Amino acid sequence: MCDDLTERDIDAYFRESGISRRSFNKATVGATVAAMLPTAANAVDIVGSDVTITTPDGEADAYFVHPAEGASAAVMFWPSIVGIRETFRVMGTRLAESGYAVLVINPYYRTQSGPVIPEDKGFRDPGMRDVLMPFARTLSPETCVTDGSAYVEWLDQQDVVDSSKKMGSIGYCMTGSYCMRLAAAMPNRIGAGCSFHGGGLVTDADNSPHRLIPQMKASFLVAIATNDDERNPDEKNVLRDSFDEAGVEAEIEVYEGALHGWCIPDSGVYHEAQAERAWGRMLALFERTLA
C-alpha cells in the first residue's frame, strides 16, 4: 500500500530518472489520460453517466459506463486511495469499450461526493497524504462488503447488465483487498477479481483476505509491484499456497521493474509496458470467466 517506504521507492525512482515529481505533475496537467491509452481492440460504442446508488450508509455517487447496445457482464471498478477521479473514469470507459458494463465507484461517498483531491495532485504531493488518510480510515472490511453488496444489487437491476453472467471486481492499492473480500462474501455472484498492486492481502488478522479464499469461487489475477514484493517477499507464496489449497484459480505475478502504482496512468511511476500487460491479463481473465 501507499506508505512512507513506498514513497521512498518513488523518490528514488525519480532521482534515478533525473526528473522530479513536481515537474512530472506540471508536464501532465491538461493532458488527457485517454490520449495515453491505446484504443480497445474491437471497441464498441459506449454510453456513460453519473449515477447515485442507495447503500445502507447513504447515497453513493458513481460513474456507470456500458456498451450502447445489448446487455453485458458487469464489473465493479474500485479506485486507489486517491479516490474517484478522471483517470479512473477514463479507465472504466476503456473497459466498457471491450464489452463490459462498468461501475466506477467513489469509496468515500460517506464523506464527500466526487474527487477528494485536485486532479493534478497525488498521494505524494505536499499535504495530500494528510487529506487522504482520514478518508481511507472511514472504510473497513465491513463497509467494503455492505457497499459491494449494494452495488451488485443495483447493477443486477439495470437493463444493460446481463445478470445471468458472473460479475467482475477490480481494485487498485488499498482496494485490491476489496475484490477478495467481495468474492468471499458473494461467491455465487462474483466470478473474477483483479488486484493491482493491492495492499493488505495477507495479514495476521483472522479476517485477512487470504484466509477467505476457501469461501471464493472467483478466478483471480494478483499483479504485484516489484517494490511491494521486495518488502513482503513471502506474501506471494502465502497467496499461492492459499489459492492452491482451496482449489481456486489464480494468476499471481510480480511485475518486474514496476513500482507500487504502476498501473494508473496519472501515477508518477506509471509503467506503460507493464500496465498494458496487466490490462491484457485482466481482459483474458474476464473473457474466460465473464463473457
Image (spheres, rainbow, N blue to C red):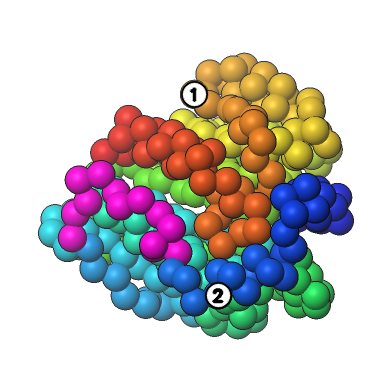
**Disc 1, SS:** loop
Q: Nearer the viewer, mark 1 or mark 2?
A: 2
Say few, some or many: other residues with alpha carbon within 10 Å of mark 2 (under 14 / 14 to 19 / 20 or more). few
Q: Which mark is on residue 262?
A: none
> Residue type at mark 2?
Val
Pointer 1 with pointer 2, Cβ within 8 A: no
Mark 1 residue crowding within 10 angstroms, few (<14) / some (14–19) / many (20+):
some
In the picture as drawn, the residue positioned furthest to the front comes out as 18
Principal secondary structure, stretch drawn in magenta: loop
Residue stretch rendered in magenta on the structure: 33-45
Three-letter code for the amino acid on which mark 1 is drawn: Glu
Residue drawn at the location 72% of the way across and 64% of the way down: 21
Q: From the image, tell me which residue sits under label 1.
A: 249
From the viewer's perspective, is 162 left or right of 21? left
Q: Is residue 277 above or below residue 135?
A: above
Q: In front: 59, or 27?
A: 27
Residue in the image at 45% along x and 64% along y: 33
Mark number displayed over residue 29: 2
Instruction: Please indicate, yes or no, whether residue 197 appears anywhere in the rendered image.
Output: yes
Instruction: State which tag comes first along the sequence, 1 or 2.
Output: 2
Name, please, the residue furthest toward the left: 69
The one nearer the camera, 268 or 84, is 268
Judge whether residue 11 is colored magenta. no
Q: Position of residue 139 (x, y in %)?
A: 69, 65
Counting from the top left corner in percent of width and height, residue 285 is at 39, 33
Q: Position of residue 108 (x, y in %)?
A: 61, 73
Give the quarter of the figure containing the C terminus: top left
